Image (cartoon, grey):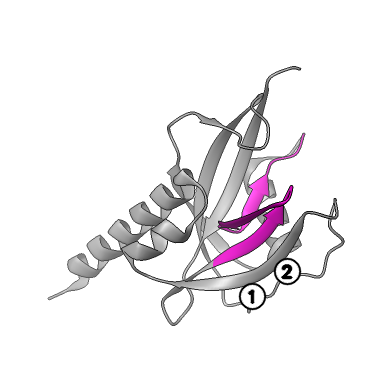
Amino acid sequence: MKKKLSIRVYAIFQTEDGKIPVLREKYQGLELLKFPGGGMVWGEGVIDTLKRELYEELGMRHFSYELFFIYEKPIISIFNPEVSVVTIYYIVTSKENLSIRKQTPVKKDNALLEILYLPLEESSCNLLTFENDRLALKTFLQRQQTQMRNTEC
């Protein structure tokens, strides 16, 4: 089998009440807790992927974004050892209400199950399935704390 590269693009954002939305998803029979987003397809740019994934998963059309984090360690896919994964995270801002779009799963064992809202605290990191998501959230929390300290009088 030919080795492949998978570029994954994810969104981290915070609700007005300070929660972090994540998706509970079933993929290839495994239940995952992950950020909204997914894989780049041939001919797509990174922002195109972000926009497509947020629309496909959450129906989001209007949002702003800022490049936030690129996971620097090599990742071998847990679903296919012939695939190396690169993950890119954006901080997304939107006023839109979130809801899972009704979709027909690609396979019967793949489905978005629900949106969960995690508290903005370090213990939330441990709930995420993938190490790269945990590190991205930890970095996001550190950034939030730094911004709060910088705005204090």
Residue 6, given in percent of the width and then of the height, sits at 65, 33
Q: Residue at x 24, y 69 (%)?
A: 148
Majority SS type along the magenta span: strand
Which one is nearer the viewer's eye here, 35 or 13? Answer: 35
Quadrant of the snapshot with the C terminus: bottom left
Which one is nearer the viewer's eye here, 143 or 25? Answer: 25
Say if 113 sits above or below 44 in the image: below
Q: Which mark is residue 59?
A: 2
Crowding near the residue tagged with mark 2, few <14, some 14–19, many ≥20 C-alpha atoms within 10 Å: some
How much space separates mark 1 and mark 2, taking CA atoms?
Answer: 7 Å
Q: Residue at x 54, y 40 (%)?
A: 87
Most extreme residue toward the front, as rendered?
Answer: 29
The stretch of residues the image draws in magenta is 22-42
Residue under numbered circle 1: 98
Which element carries disc 2, helix, strand or loop? Answer: loop
Residue 74, given in percent of the width and then of the height, sits at 48, 28
